Image: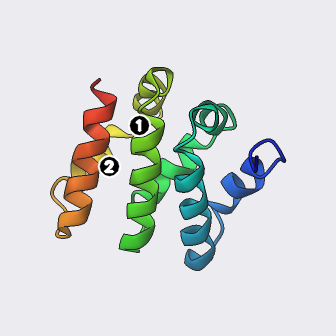
Amino acid sequence: KMAVEGALPPLIALLSHPSTEVQLHASGAIRNLSVNDENKVKIARDVGLRPLIELLSSSVVEIQEQAVIALRNLCANSENQAKVVQEGVLPPLIGMLRAFEESLQMLSAACIRNIAL
């Protein structure tokens, strides 16, 4: 319902907000919305992939987690798999496989798994 009401474009815009607190909440909202099949297509269509990929390089681990979970969910859609690779998701995901935080290692591996389907 939120996507239909127009929540996606402003949420996607907030992914690039200078405040990490705003980024955290926006990426969490996108994460939650990304479990819906229709939203998976809308988020990718509304140019939500690039800002999520950029958040993988955030200095805030919680933001990285929200972004990689959203990308993992989005990559359950076969059309989005090629799109995220074209947008450059693989280098940051591969880097996250070597992260100190085990959660980032696990989540990046899960995202790569979904891309490889």
Q: What kind of element bears circle 2?
A: helix
Q: Is residue 80 left or right of residue 96?
A: right
Disc 1 residue crowd, few under 14, some 14–19, many 20+, Cα 10 Å: some
Q: What is the three-letter code of the residue carrying label 1?
A: Gly
Name the residue located 58 percent from the left edge and 78 percent from the top edge.
21
* Furthest residue in direction right, as rendered: 5
Q: How is the image coloured?
A: rainbow
* Number of numbered discs on residues: 2
Residue 43 placement: quadrant: top right
Mark 2 and mark 1 in contact? Answer it, CB < 8 Å.
Answer: yes
According to the picture, the residue beneath numbered tag 1 turns out to be: 88
Q: What kind of element bears circle 1?
A: loop
Name the residue located 72 percent from the left edge and 48 percent from the top edge.
8
Q: Is residue 59 left or right of residue 35?
A: left
Q: CA distance from mark 2 to mark 1?
A: 8 Å
Name the residue located 60 percent from the left edge and 34 percent from the top edge.
44
Q: What is the three-letter code of the residue carrying label 2?
A: Pro
Name the residue located 36 percent from the left edge and 71 percent from the top edge.
61
x then y, percent, for residue 25: 59, 70
Q: Is residue 50 visible?
A: yes
Between 21 and 103, the one nearer to me in the picture: 103
Which quadrant is the C terminus positioned in? Answer: top left
x then y, percent, for residue 7: 77, 52
Residue 30 placement: quadrant: bottom right
x then y, percent, for residue 6: 82, 47
85 vs 2: above or below: above
Q: Is residue 18 left or right of residue 113?
A: right
According to the picture, the residue beneath numbered tag 2 turns out to be: 92
Q: Is residue 59 visible?
A: no
